[in-house]
Amino acid sequence: MVKKFTVLSLLLILAGTAAHAFRPYAKSAEPRASWMTVSSLKTGRQYYMEVAEDGTAITRTETKNTIAVKRGKIPPQLAKDFLREIENSEIIGAHSYTENKLVFYKGELLNISAHINGELKRIDAPLNDFGEAFSHAFDEVKKAAAKMPGENKLKGFLISETLSGTALKEFQIKAAKDGMVKIIETYDFQEITPLLSAIKQPHRLIPLENSAQVSEIQDFVSRHQLYGFGKIFYLPSTRGIFKCQILNAAK
């Protein structure tokens, strides 16, 4: 009984970091950026795009049968205009959109992450609720990104999300059944650049440039005996409990 209480208590403490706003590790020289996924609730089609203020961009479009990735640069002014619209968005700024508003919604859903007032915030809301100015800036960036060259050298992407709600409870039950959860300290994976980046920036697709990076992550998972299956693994860290996944860059 003592062991189970210890596990659940520890996981509940870590769950406190599972909110939608994340404090960044530290300010860095990286340009401002935002990353987002547009999901069609009708067709199941997913479109991922990230844009940095210097114009660096990447997109990943997934359908039932194909995955297409583009990477390159768009005009920096378009990127800056779009980031400004993101920062001025009342939905993202207020961060008060509730899931019950999406129950009967069947259109396109935008899941977007951006730094607002020093915090990394994420919001899920219908794309058409973001306003005309935002939609125009989004369309301009999307059209420019579509002109970028196709990317066929990447080995994949690493993405993470902080567990919360039902997913967190399920993990807690599993952890309590299997025994004490070993918390992985940041210094244990700080040299695994893609993994550290994924934990610092949940929901962002972190490029895996070569097979060595994929193997390094797989070796880390095996070495620390992290719970998972296939290309999915769970990382209990001092910043929370993360579900991580290696995504294909092509299909």
Image (spheres, rainbow, N blue to C red):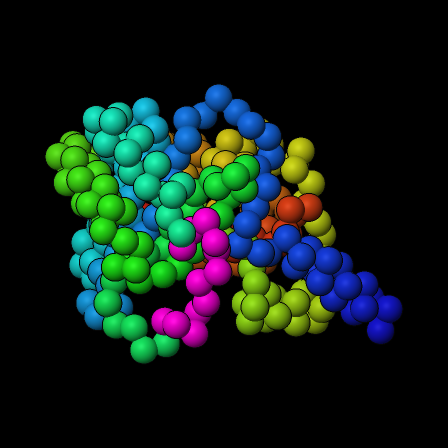
Q: For the N terminus, which image quadrant?
A: bottom right
Where does the image place residue 230, in percent across and percent down from the top left?
44, 57
Give the residue drawn at x 27%, y 53%.
131
Q: Is residue 181 left or right of residue 27?
A: right
224 in relation to 100, above or below? above
Most frequent secondary structure within the magenta stretch: helix
Say which residue appears at 59% left-offset and 51% top-offset. 235
Residue found at the very far bottom of the displayed protein? 104
Q: Nearer the viewer, residue 121 or 5?
A: 121
Q: Which residues are magenta?
A: 91-102
Percent across and percent down for residue 29 are: 48, 21
Is residue 136 visible from the viewing direction of this image?
Answer: yes
Q: Is residue 204 left or right of residue 19?
A: left
Q: Is residue 71 above or below residue 171?
A: above
Q: Is residue 185 magenta?
A: no
Q: Is residue 50 visible?
A: no
Q: Position of residue 212 (x, y in %)?
A: 43, 32
> In the shown orientation, is residue 86 left or right of residue 186?
left
Q: Which quadrant of the view contains residue 10?
A: bottom right
At 66% from the left and 67% from the top, the residue drawn is 172
- List x then y, in percent, for residue 247: 36, 49
For residue 190, above or below residue 15? above
Is 126 positioned to the left or the right of 218 in the image? left
Residue at image coords 56%, 27% = 27
